[in-house]
Structure formats: structure tokens, C-alpha cells
Image: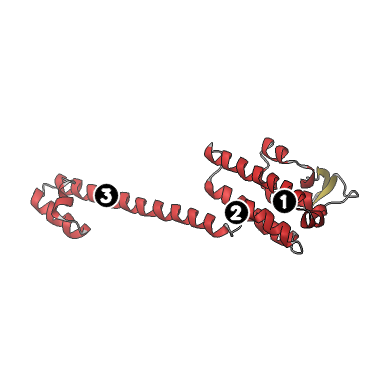
Amino acid sequence: MRYHDSTSDKLKIRIVAPGGSLEYDIPVMKAGRYTVEDIFDKKLLLLIPFYIFSHEGRFEEYEKDKIKLMALQEEYEQIKGRLEELLLQGMISEYTRCTILDMSNKVLEHIALKYSVVREGVKSVMGGRVLEYEAKTIRNEGIEEGIEKGIEKGIEKGIEGTVSILKNLGVPAQTILAEIQEQYNLTAEASRKYL
């Protein structure tokens, strides 16, 4: 994501195949040129973790000047607020929000290694703690809950299918109750709802 004035606005891609080659220009995305407004207006949320690069040249100033650091923190407060709005509108998931915040903290950790005031100042706004585990926990809990509900539904369908087959075979209701109680480890009361 770092670039210099000498970095070209286009790069060449060359595809070489047995029958020849093809070459074309692709535009270079320079994340530092995107404002917070651009990122949200153009729905380029993947750039948020790298937005800190646009401030990298001023880390020393932020480290020494609390007012400038507060302005940086306000910018990140705006980013966090906009992500929260997208979450409330259903445009992104909690997992996506947490992942963006987590990745922002990881990038910050690496590029502001020598600037503890900057690092801690931005992290205090973005969540401070490692959100990777929070995001993974949310996701994993959702998967676990889905599996549990799927198993419950599967068992219910299995019981309903068993009852239907036994009824079609003319098996008496008492025998069906006894069978599903034993096979599915149900109470007498729970098994009656399937008849």
C-alpha cells in the first residue's frame, strides 16, 4: 500500500501462453489517495485497514502533538461510527465489522511500531483489544447454533418419518410410542406430539 511520487499510475500485466502473449495496462490503486468519504461512498471497505498509511508520514507529529493526535482519533471515530451505521442498516455483518476493525489494528501495530502514542491512541478508538477472536467467536457461535438447530430439525424429521411409516404399516399407536421413545430417547409426553 505504500507508494511514492515516482510510482506509476499503471502497471503492465503480461500473460504468456504457448500460442503467444498478451500485455495490457491495469490501474494502480493508491489507497492513500482515498479519503474516508471516498472509501464509504465507493464501498471500498477493504481499504479501511490500510487507511492509516495516508497518515504514516505524520506519525512523528502525532506522537508529539496531542491536538493533532486527537484529530486522527476523531477520523477513526468517524470510521468506526460509519461501520456501525452499515451494521445497523444490514449492509455488513458483525463479523465483517469486527474483521475490518481487527485488520485495522493489525496494520496499525506493524506500521506504527515505533510510535506507541499513535498506536495506542488509534487502538483506543478502534476497539483496543484484539477483535480477531471476537469475530471468530461470533462466527463460530453462529455455526454451532446452526448445527444444533439442524440436528434438532433432522431428528424431528426422522421421528416424523418413522411414525408415518409405522402408521402406514398399520402398527398400533402404543407400539409406535414405545418404539420412538426407545429409538429417540424421548419421554412418553414428548413422543405423543408425533402421533
Q: Earlier in the sequence, mark 3 or mark 2?
A: 2
Colour scheme of the picture: secondary structure
Q: Residue at x 54, y 60 (%)?
A: 133
Give the class, few, some or many, for how many residues have Cα within 10 Å of label 1's Cα (few <14, many ≥20): many
- Single out the residue that lies furthest toward the bottom: 114
| Relative image position of residue 13 (x, y in whole percent) | 81, 49
Of badges 3 and 2, nearer the viewer stands 2
Determine the secondary structure under disc 1.
helix
Alpha carbons under labels 3 and 2: distance apart: 43 Å
Residue located beneath label 3 in the image: 156
Query: Looking at the picture, which amino acid does disc 1 mark?
Result: Phe
Is the residue 161 above or below the residue 178 in the image?
A: above
Q: In the rendering, which numbered label is found on residue 50?
A: 1
Alpha carbons under labels 3 and 1: distance apart: 49 Å
Q: Nearer the viewer, residue 111 or 44?
A: 111
| Relative image position of residue 44 (x, y in whole percent) | 68, 42
Residue located beneath label 2 in the image: 127
